[in-house]
């Protein structure tokens, strides 16, 4: 609607300025001046409101939506490893910005958190989960929605914050660090198995 009033104000302003003396309103100076002033006010007022909406978010308010996703460790612990392997979350840098890889509860495929404005880590004793807080700008009410309907300002994302709620024993590592840890664990397991076999062989000899 604001575009309509802007165009109408500009069109009427030009029309009243350029109108010939044969027009009825031109024959009355006070009417002519009043119409010129009103059209100019409508034009300038519409332009001012558009600028305020674009740069100062006039008619807008902040709205925060929260989405919660249960997650599990990238390396699920099982059997004897359950007490040795911590909850693991992977980190990958996209330029200077970190992206975190996780697995949704009950699935095996890796998901990524995407580029966000902020990542936080909290401790929980409950099932680990990811809280995605998205802050957006929306119109305050229906009037502003109709007034600035062509502005493209509705549901513009202002910021996204990821809050990971993880067990006390957790590690955030890169893919390379995870590979090194898995390699070290396999080596340790092989050594333990070898030691157990040697001990069993020595007992059988006795």
Image (cartoon, rainbow, N blue to C red):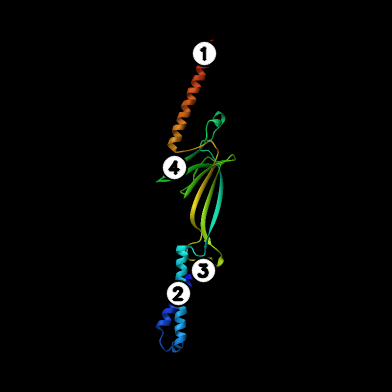
Residue at the spot of label 4: 92
- Look at the picture and state if 75 lies above or below 18: above
Between disc 2 and disc 3, the foreground one is 2
Does dot 2 land on a helix, a strand or a loop?
helix
Give the crowd class for mark 3: few <14, some 14-19, many >=20 residues within 10 Å: some
What percent of the width, then of the height, locates residue 31? 47, 85
Tell me the CA gap for discs 4 and 3: 44 Å
Q: Nearer the viewer, residue 195 or 124?
A: 124
Residue at the spot of label 2: 43
- Contact between labelled residues 1 and 4, with CB atoms less than 8 Å apart: no
- Look at the picture and state if 5 lies above or below 170: below
* Residue 190 visible, this orientation: yes
Residue occupying image coordinates x 48% and y 56%: 158
Give the crowd class for mark 4: few <14, some 14-19, many >=20 residues within 10 Å: some
Residue occupying image coordinates x 52% and y 19%: 196
What percent of the width, then of the height, locates residue 118? 48, 48
Residue occupying image coordinates x 46% and y 45%: 99
Between disc 2 and disc 4, the foreground one is 2
Point out the tag, 4 or 3, that comes first from the N-terminus.
4
Identify the image quadrant of residue 20: bottom left
Q: Nearer the viewer, residue 38 or 103?
A: 38
Point out the tag, 3 or 1, that comes first from the N-terminus.
3
Tell me the CA gap for discs 1 and 2: 98 Å
Point out the tag, 2 or 4, that comes first from the N-terminus.
2
- Contact between labelled residues 1 and 3, with CB atoms less than 8 Å apart: no
Between disc 3 and disc 1, the foreground one is 3
What percent of the width, then of the height, locates residue 66? 56, 51
Tell me the CA gap for discs 3 and 1: 88 Å
Point out the tag, 1 or 2, that comes first from the N-terminus.
2
Residue at the spot of label 1: 202
Residue at the spot of label 3: 147
Between disc 1 and disc 2, the foreground one is 2
């Amino acid at each position: 609607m604001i575009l309509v009033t802007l165009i109408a104000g500009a069109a009427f302003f030009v029309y009243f300025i350029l109108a010939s003396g044969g027009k009825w309103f031109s024959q009355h100076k006070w009417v002519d001046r009043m119409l010129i002033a009103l059209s100019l006010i409508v034009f300038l007022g519409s332009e001012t409101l558009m600028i305020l909406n674009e740069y100062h978010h006039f008619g807008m308010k902040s709205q925060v939506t929260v989405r919660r996703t249960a997650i599990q460790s990238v390396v699920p612990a099982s059997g004897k490893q359950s007490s040795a392997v911590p909850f693991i979350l992977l980190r990958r840098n996209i330029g200077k910005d970190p992206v975190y890889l996780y697995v949704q509860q009950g699935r095996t495929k890796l998901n990524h958190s995407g580029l966000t404005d902020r990542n936080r880590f909290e401790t929980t004793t409950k099932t680990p989960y990811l809280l995605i807080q998205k802050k957006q700008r929306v119109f305050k009410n229906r009037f502003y929605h109709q007034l600035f309907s062509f502005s493209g300002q509705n549901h513009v994302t202002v910021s996204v914050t990821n809050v990971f709620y993880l067990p006390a024993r957790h590690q955030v590592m890169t893919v390379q660090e995870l590979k090194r840890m898995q390699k070290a664990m396999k080596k340790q397991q092989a050594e333990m198995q070898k030691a157990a076999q040697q001990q069993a062989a020595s007992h059988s000899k006795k």
